[in-house]
Image: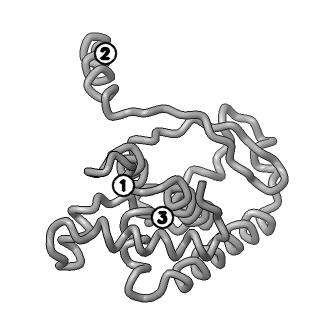
Amino acid sequence: MTKKKAKRKQAAAAPHRLPAMRTVRVGAEEIPVIVNEAESPLGWLRRRKGADGKPLIGAAQFEAGEKLRADFTLGQMNPRVTADWSGAPAGGDRRSLMRDPAEIADHALAARERVARALDAAGPGLSGILLRVCCHLEGLEAAERGFGWPKRSGKLVLQIALDRLVRHYGIREG
């Protein structure tokens, strides 16, 4: 790809990126990371305002959904579509392989258990929308089609499901 094509491609993608700094807790360590808030349907709903001028989902709902997504990712529950290169040392550095595999597996297992408890707390009628939107990053319209729901019904169902997560996680509003 030429430099000119690469610049055009980057410029076209720029409006679809919303970089933000976050800290992620891994064990006892907090690591700063840059995330793209535009990739998450929850981020879109958080930025979008309703007729009353308020965001379509509140801060507590957003936090609960992102917490579910983080555990889903830490639990390595995403479907794999390519080879797993996580064990390959970056730049020939063998120290990156020195982590205890049992510790990684325990960490992932604990995250999977947290996801299962959160989805159980939401209930069988609401856990599906949480999985599709929060974990698989599926848009509301696609989730509605997938469930065979009427148009514009997914937002309300998602709000109810997120409220259940807020209660489960003990997140306080405001």
Identify which residue is drawn at 64% across, 62% down: 172
- Amino acid under disc 3: Asn
Identify which amino acid the numbered label 2 is placed on.
Lys
How far from the left and from the top, in percent, is residue 60? Answer: 55, 59
Q: Label 1 sits on what residue type?
A: Leu
The answer to whether 159 appears left or right of 105 in the picture is: left
Of residues 25 and 152, which is closer to you in this image? 152
Circle nearer the viewer, 1 or 3: 1
Q: Residue furthest top?
A: 4
Q: Residue at x 51, y 76 (%)?
A: 164
Tag 3, which secondary structure? loop
Instruction: Give the labeled residue for mark 1.
Output: 56
Q: Residue under label 2, please give it.
A: 7
User: 154 or 24: which is nearer to us?
Assistant: 154
Image label count = 3
- Residue 151 in percent (x, y) is at 15, 68
Element type where label 1 sits in the image: loop
Residue denoted by label 3: 78
Identify the residue at horizontal 54%, vertical 34% (top origin).
20
Please state, as top left, top right, bottom left or bottom right, where the C terminus lies in the image: bottom right
Q: Dot 1: within a 10 Å radius of its alpha carbon, few (fewer than 14), some, or many (20 or more) residues?
A: many
Task: Please state the horizontal and vertical placement of residue 27, each as a whole percent of the image.
Answer: 80, 56
Can you give x and y, in whole percent of width and height, for residue 26 in the image?
75, 53
The quadrant in which residue 18 appears is top left
Cα distance, mark 1 to mark 3? 26 Å
